[in-house]
Amino acid sequence: MTISDIKRLGREPLVHFLLIGAALFVLFDMTQEQGGEAPNRIVVSSGQVEQLAAQFKRTWMRPPTQDELAALVENHVREEVFYREALAMGLDQNDPMVRQRMRMKLEFMLEELSAVAASDEVLTEFLQQHPDKFRAQPRVSFQQLYLNPDKREDLAFDAQTMLTSLKGGTVPESLGDATMLPLRYTLATQSEIARSFGDRFAEDVVKLTPGDWTGPHYSPFGAHLLKVAERVDARLPALAEIRALVEREYLAQRKKEQKDLAYQKLRQGYQVIVEPLATAQGSSGEALAAMQPDEAK
Protein backbone atom coordinates (compact mmCIF):
# COMPACT_ATOMS: atom_id res chain seq x y z
CA MET A 1 0.00 0.00 0.00
CA THR A 2 1.42 3.37 -1.03
CA ILE A 3 1.50 6.54 1.07
CA SER A 4 -1.18 8.11 -1.15
CA ASP A 5 -3.44 5.10 -0.48
CA ILE A 6 -2.96 5.56 3.27
CA LYS A 7 -3.80 9.28 3.00
CA ARG A 8 -6.91 8.47 0.99
CA LEU A 9 -8.06 5.96 3.60
CA GLY A 10 -7.43 8.54 6.30
CA ARG A 11 -10.08 10.77 4.72
CA GLU A 12 -12.73 8.06 4.52
CA PRO A 13 -15.65 8.59 6.97
CA LEU A 14 -15.92 4.82 7.54
CA VAL A 15 -12.33 4.69 8.76
CA HIS A 16 -13.01 7.61 11.09
CA PHE A 17 -16.06 5.85 12.50
CA LEU A 18 -14.18 2.58 13.03
CA LEU A 19 -11.53 4.48 14.99
CA ILE A 20 -14.22 6.21 17.05
CA GLY A 21 -15.95 2.88 17.66
CA ALA A 22 -12.71 1.27 18.80
CA ALA A 23 -12.07 4.16 21.17
CA LEU A 24 -15.60 3.83 22.55
CA PHE A 25 -15.11 0.15 23.26
CA VAL A 26 -11.79 0.80 24.99
CA LEU A 27 -13.35 3.55 27.07
CA PHE A 28 -16.28 1.30 27.94
CA ASP A 29 -13.95 -1.49 29.08
CA MET A 30 -11.97 0.96 31.18
CA THR A 31 -15.07 2.32 32.87
CA GLN A 32 -16.36 -1.20 33.45
CA GLU A 33 -13.10 -2.13 35.14
CA GLN A 34 -13.13 1.02 37.24
CA GLY A 35 -16.72 0.45 38.24
CA GLY A 36 -16.22 -3.25 38.88
CA GLU A 37 -15.34 -2.79 42.53
CA ALA A 38 -17.76 -3.68 45.32
CA PRO A 39 -20.63 -1.20 45.66
CA ASN A 40 -19.72 -0.47 49.30
CA ARG A 41 -16.01 0.06 48.63
CA ILE A 42 -14.71 3.52 47.71
CA VAL A 43 -11.08 3.94 46.70
CA VAL A 44 -9.63 7.45 46.57
CA SER A 45 -6.44 7.06 44.59
CA SER A 46 -3.29 9.10 45.13
CA GLY A 47 -3.89 10.68 41.73
CA GLN A 48 -7.33 11.86 42.82
CA VAL A 49 -5.88 13.31 46.02
CA GLU A 50 -3.26 15.17 43.98
CA GLN A 51 -5.99 16.48 41.70
CA LEU A 52 -8.01 17.75 44.66
CA ALA A 53 -4.92 19.49 46.04
CA ALA A 54 -4.13 21.02 42.64
CA GLN A 55 -7.68 22.36 42.29
CA PHE A 56 -7.44 23.93 45.75
CA LYS A 57 -4.11 25.55 44.86
CA ARG A 58 -5.48 27.02 41.63
CA THR A 59 -8.37 28.56 43.56
CA TRP A 60 -6.57 29.83 46.66
CA MET A 61 -3.06 30.32 45.23
CA ARG A 62 -1.51 28.13 47.94
CA PRO A 63 -1.39 24.41 48.75
CA PRO A 64 -3.99 23.07 51.23
CA THR A 65 -3.11 22.28 54.83
CA GLN A 66 -3.44 18.70 56.08
CA ASP A 67 -6.84 19.48 57.60
CA GLU A 68 -8.04 21.19 54.42
CA LEU A 69 -6.86 18.29 52.28
CA ALA A 70 -8.61 15.82 54.59
CA ALA A 71 -11.80 17.88 54.26
CA LEU A 72 -11.46 17.85 50.48
CA VAL A 73 -11.09 14.07 50.45
CA GLU A 74 -14.07 13.65 52.79
CA ASN A 75 -16.19 15.87 50.55
CA HIS A 76 -15.15 13.75 47.56
CA VAL A 77 -16.19 10.61 49.45
CA ARG A 78 -19.48 12.24 50.44
CA GLU A 79 -20.20 13.03 46.80
CA GLU A 80 -19.38 9.47 45.75
CA VAL A 81 -21.63 7.98 48.47
CA PHE A 82 -24.58 10.14 47.47
CA TYR A 83 -23.94 9.45 43.79
CA ARG A 84 -23.95 5.68 44.27
CA GLU A 85 -27.02 5.77 46.49
CA ALA A 86 -28.84 7.94 43.94
CA LEU A 87 -27.98 5.44 41.20
CA ALA A 88 -29.16 2.55 43.40
CA MET A 89 -32.48 4.35 43.93
CA GLY A 90 -32.83 4.96 40.18
CA LEU A 91 -32.84 8.73 40.56
CA ASP A 92 -30.94 9.05 37.29
CA GLN A 93 -33.84 7.51 35.38
CA ASN A 94 -36.25 9.75 33.45
CA ASP A 95 -34.44 12.89 34.50
CA PRO A 96 -34.19 15.18 31.44
CA MET A 97 -31.24 17.12 32.85
CA VAL A 98 -29.26 13.96 33.54
CA ARG A 99 -30.09 12.57 30.10
CA GLN A 100 -29.04 15.80 28.42
CA ARG A 101 -25.81 15.93 30.40
CA MET A 102 -24.92 12.34 29.47
CA ARG A 103 -25.69 13.02 25.82
CA MET A 104 -23.51 16.13 25.87
CA LYS A 105 -20.61 14.21 27.41
CA LEU A 106 -20.83 11.47 24.78
CA GLU A 107 -21.08 13.98 21.93
CA PHE A 108 -18.14 15.92 23.34
CA MET A 109 -16.10 12.72 23.48
CA LEU A 110 -16.97 11.95 19.86
CA GLU A 111 -15.93 15.47 18.88
CA GLU A 112 -12.58 15.10 20.63
CA LEU A 113 -11.95 11.77 18.91
CA SER A 114 -12.60 13.32 15.49
CA ALA A 115 -10.60 16.52 16.10
CA VAL A 116 -7.54 15.62 14.04
CA ALA A 117 -5.38 18.35 12.49
CA ALA A 118 -6.01 18.74 8.77
CA SER A 119 -3.35 18.98 6.10
CA ASP A 120 -3.11 21.82 3.58
CA GLU A 121 -4.25 19.39 0.89
CA VAL A 122 -7.46 18.58 2.76
CA LEU A 123 -8.15 22.22 3.62
CA THR A 124 -7.54 23.36 0.03
CA GLU A 125 -10.06 20.80 -1.18
CA PHE A 126 -12.56 21.95 1.46
CA LEU A 127 -12.02 25.59 0.47
CA GLN A 128 -12.69 24.81 -3.19
CA GLN A 129 -15.80 22.81 -2.33
CA HIS A 130 -17.29 25.62 -0.18
CA PRO A 131 -16.22 28.89 -1.84
CA ASP A 132 -19.27 30.83 -0.62
CA LYS A 133 -18.18 30.33 2.99
CA PHE A 134 -14.88 32.09 2.44
CA ARG A 135 -15.28 34.43 -0.53
CA ALA A 136 -14.15 37.95 0.35
CA GLN A 137 -16.86 40.56 -0.14
CA PRO A 138 -16.56 43.22 -2.83
CA ARG A 139 -15.33 46.60 -1.57
CA VAL A 140 -16.10 50.04 -2.92
CA SER A 141 -14.79 53.55 -2.32
CA PHE A 142 -17.43 56.11 -3.22
CA GLN A 143 -18.82 59.57 -2.58
CA GLN A 144 -22.54 60.17 -2.17
CA LEU A 145 -24.86 63.18 -2.27
CA TYR A 146 -28.27 62.88 -0.64
CA LEU A 147 -31.62 64.17 -1.91
CA ASN A 148 -34.33 64.28 0.75
CA PRO A 149 -37.74 63.35 -0.77
CA ASP A 150 -39.56 65.31 1.95
CA LYS A 151 -37.95 68.56 0.77
CA ARG A 152 -38.35 68.13 -2.99
CA GLU A 153 -41.53 68.18 -5.06
CA ASP A 154 -39.93 66.49 -8.09
CA LEU A 155 -37.14 64.28 -6.79
CA ALA A 156 -36.26 62.73 -10.17
CA PHE A 157 -36.02 66.14 -11.89
CA ASP A 158 -33.86 67.60 -9.12
CA ALA A 159 -31.58 64.56 -9.25
CA GLN A 160 -31.01 64.91 -12.99
CA THR A 161 -30.38 68.65 -12.68
CA MET A 162 -27.86 68.08 -9.89
CA LEU A 163 -26.22 65.27 -11.84
CA THR A 164 -25.73 67.58 -14.83
CA SER A 165 -24.18 70.22 -12.55
CA LEU A 166 -21.76 67.70 -11.05
CA LYS A 167 -20.64 66.50 -14.45
CA GLY A 168 -20.15 70.13 -15.40
CA GLY A 169 -17.67 70.65 -12.59
CA THR A 170 -19.83 71.98 -9.74
CA VAL A 171 -18.30 71.38 -6.31
CA PRO A 172 -20.17 68.46 -4.67
CA GLU A 173 -20.22 70.08 -1.23
CA SER A 174 -22.42 72.88 -2.59
CA LEU A 175 -25.17 70.45 -3.58
CA GLY A 176 -27.37 67.92 -1.89
CA ASP A 177 -29.38 67.88 1.34
CA ALA A 178 -28.20 67.47 4.91
CA THR A 179 -27.83 63.89 6.13
CA MET A 180 -26.33 61.98 9.05
CA LEU A 181 -24.84 59.48 6.61
CA PRO A 182 -21.13 59.84 5.75
CA LEU A 183 -20.49 61.55 2.43
CA ARG A 184 -17.48 59.34 1.65
CA TYR A 185 -16.74 55.65 2.11
CA THR A 186 -13.32 54.06 1.66
CA LEU A 187 -13.23 50.44 0.50
CA ALA A 188 -16.43 49.64 2.39
CA THR A 189 -17.62 46.03 2.14
CA GLN A 190 -21.02 45.20 0.72
CA SER A 191 -22.33 44.30 4.19
CA GLU A 192 -21.06 47.61 5.63
CA ILE A 193 -22.83 49.54 2.87
CA ALA A 194 -25.99 47.50 3.44
CA ARG A 195 -26.00 48.42 7.13
CA SER A 196 -26.14 52.09 6.19
CA PHE A 197 -28.28 52.08 3.03
CA GLY A 198 -30.03 48.70 2.81
CA ASP A 199 -29.34 45.48 0.92
CA ARG A 200 -30.69 46.52 -2.46
CA PHE A 201 -28.68 49.75 -2.50
CA ALA A 202 -25.51 47.86 -1.55
CA GLU A 203 -26.07 45.31 -4.31
CA ASP A 204 -26.30 48.13 -6.85
CA VAL A 205 -23.26 50.04 -5.56
CA VAL A 206 -20.83 47.11 -5.73
CA LYS A 207 -21.68 46.69 -9.43
CA LEU A 208 -20.91 50.31 -10.38
CA THR A 209 -17.85 51.06 -12.49
CA PRO A 210 -15.41 53.66 -11.14
CA GLY A 211 -15.74 56.94 -12.99
CA ASP A 212 -18.09 59.94 -13.09
CA TRP A 213 -21.20 60.67 -11.06
CA THR A 214 -24.22 58.40 -11.60
CA GLY A 215 -27.76 58.23 -10.30
CA PRO A 216 -30.17 58.61 -8.87
CA HIS A 217 -29.78 55.47 -6.75
CA TYR A 218 -32.51 54.87 -4.20
CA SER A 219 -32.33 53.77 -0.58
CA PRO A 220 -34.97 53.74 2.18
CA PHE A 221 -33.91 57.34 2.96
CA GLY A 222 -34.41 58.77 -0.51
CA ALA A 223 -32.22 59.34 -3.58
CA HIS A 224 -28.44 59.44 -3.85
CA LEU A 225 -25.97 60.50 -6.50
CA LEU A 226 -22.81 58.40 -6.43
CA LYS A 227 -19.26 58.66 -7.69
CA VAL A 228 -17.27 55.44 -7.36
CA ALA A 229 -13.52 55.96 -7.06
CA GLU A 230 -12.37 52.36 -6.58
CA ARG A 231 -13.88 48.91 -6.63
CA VAL A 232 -12.37 45.60 -5.51
CA ASP A 233 -14.38 42.66 -6.76
CA ALA A 234 -15.28 39.65 -4.64
CA ARG A 235 -12.62 36.95 -4.68
CA LEU A 236 -11.77 33.62 -3.12
CA PRO A 237 -8.65 34.12 -0.96
CA ALA A 238 -5.77 31.65 -1.07
CA LEU A 239 -5.58 29.12 1.75
CA ALA A 240 -2.52 30.82 3.24
CA GLU A 241 -4.56 34.00 3.83
CA ILE A 242 -7.42 32.36 5.74
CA ARG A 243 -6.05 29.00 6.87
CA ALA A 244 -7.22 29.35 10.47
CA LEU A 245 -10.78 30.16 9.37
CA VAL A 246 -10.90 27.29 6.85
CA GLU A 247 -9.54 24.83 9.40
CA ARG A 248 -12.10 25.94 12.00
CA GLU A 249 -14.99 25.50 9.55
CA TYR A 250 -13.61 22.18 8.31
CA LEU A 251 -13.23 20.73 11.80
CA ALA A 252 -16.71 21.95 12.80
CA GLN A 253 -18.27 20.22 9.80
CA ARG A 254 -16.19 17.10 10.30
CA LYS A 255 -17.20 16.84 13.97
CA LYS A 256 -20.86 17.10 13.02
CA GLU A 257 -20.51 14.48 10.29
CA GLN A 258 -18.71 12.10 12.64
CA LYS A 259 -21.35 12.52 15.35
CA ASP A 260 -24.13 11.91 12.82
CA LEU A 261 -22.32 8.86 11.45
CA ALA A 262 -21.75 7.44 14.92
CA TYR A 263 -25.40 8.03 15.84
CA GLN A 264 -26.70 6.32 12.71
CA LYS A 265 -24.44 3.33 13.31
CA LEU A 266 -25.38 3.06 16.99
CA ARG A 267 -29.07 3.51 16.23
CA GLN A 268 -29.04 0.40 14.06
CA GLY A 269 -28.60 -1.60 17.24
CA TYR A 270 -31.92 -0.41 18.67
CA GLN A 271 -35.53 -1.23 17.94
CA VAL A 272 -37.48 2.03 18.00
CA ILE A 273 -41.25 1.92 18.36
CA VAL A 274 -43.30 5.13 18.37
CA GLU A 275 -46.75 4.53 19.82
CA PRO A 276 -49.56 6.83 18.57
CA LEU A 277 -51.35 9.11 21.02
CA ALA A 278 -54.73 7.62 21.82
CA THR A 279 -56.22 11.03 22.60
CA ALA A 280 -54.59 12.92 19.72
CA GLN A 281 -56.97 14.98 17.61
CA GLY A 282 -56.74 16.51 14.17
CA SER A 283 -53.90 16.32 11.72
CA SER A 284 -51.16 15.97 14.36
CA GLY A 285 -52.85 12.90 15.86
CA GLU A 286 -53.39 11.37 12.43
CA ALA A 287 -49.74 11.96 11.58
CA LEU A 288 -48.59 10.19 14.75
CA ALA A 289 -50.98 7.33 14.17
CA ALA A 290 -49.66 6.90 10.65
CA MET A 291 -46.04 6.54 11.79
CA GLN A 292 -44.72 3.03 11.38
CA PRO A 293 -42.46 1.39 13.95
CA ASP A 294 -38.82 1.79 13.02
CA GLU A 295 -37.27 -1.61 13.62
CA ALA A 296 -33.62 -2.47 13.52
CA LYS A 297 -32.54 -4.47 10.55
Image (cartoon, rainbow, N blue to C red):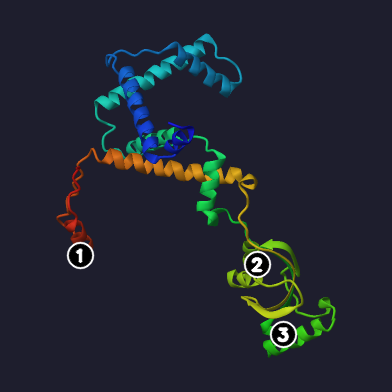
Mark 3: few, some, or many residues within 10 Å (few <14, many ≥20)?
A: many
Q: Is residue 135 left or right of residue 150?
A: left
Task: Please give left or right for residue 192 compared with residue 67 in the image.
Answer: right
Secondary structure state at the residue bearing disc 2:
helix
The N terminus lies in quadrant: top left
Image point 17% across, 49% down: which residue? Answer: 293
The residue under label 3 is: 159
What's the residue type where badge 3 is placed?
Ala
Give whichever of discs 1 and 3 has the lower sequence position. 3
Tell me where residue 24 appears, x and y as whole percent.
35, 29
Q: Position of residue 70 (x, y in %)?
A: 46, 12
Q: Position of residue 132 (x, y in %)?
A: 54, 57
Of the two numbered discs 3 and 2 on the same chain, state the one appearing first in sequence. 3
Does 123 sit left or right of 279 as displayed? right
Q: Nearer the viewer, residue 260 or 62?
A: 260
Task: Identify the residue position indicated by label 1 in the image.
Answer: 282
Identify residue for label 2: 196
* SS at badge 3: helix
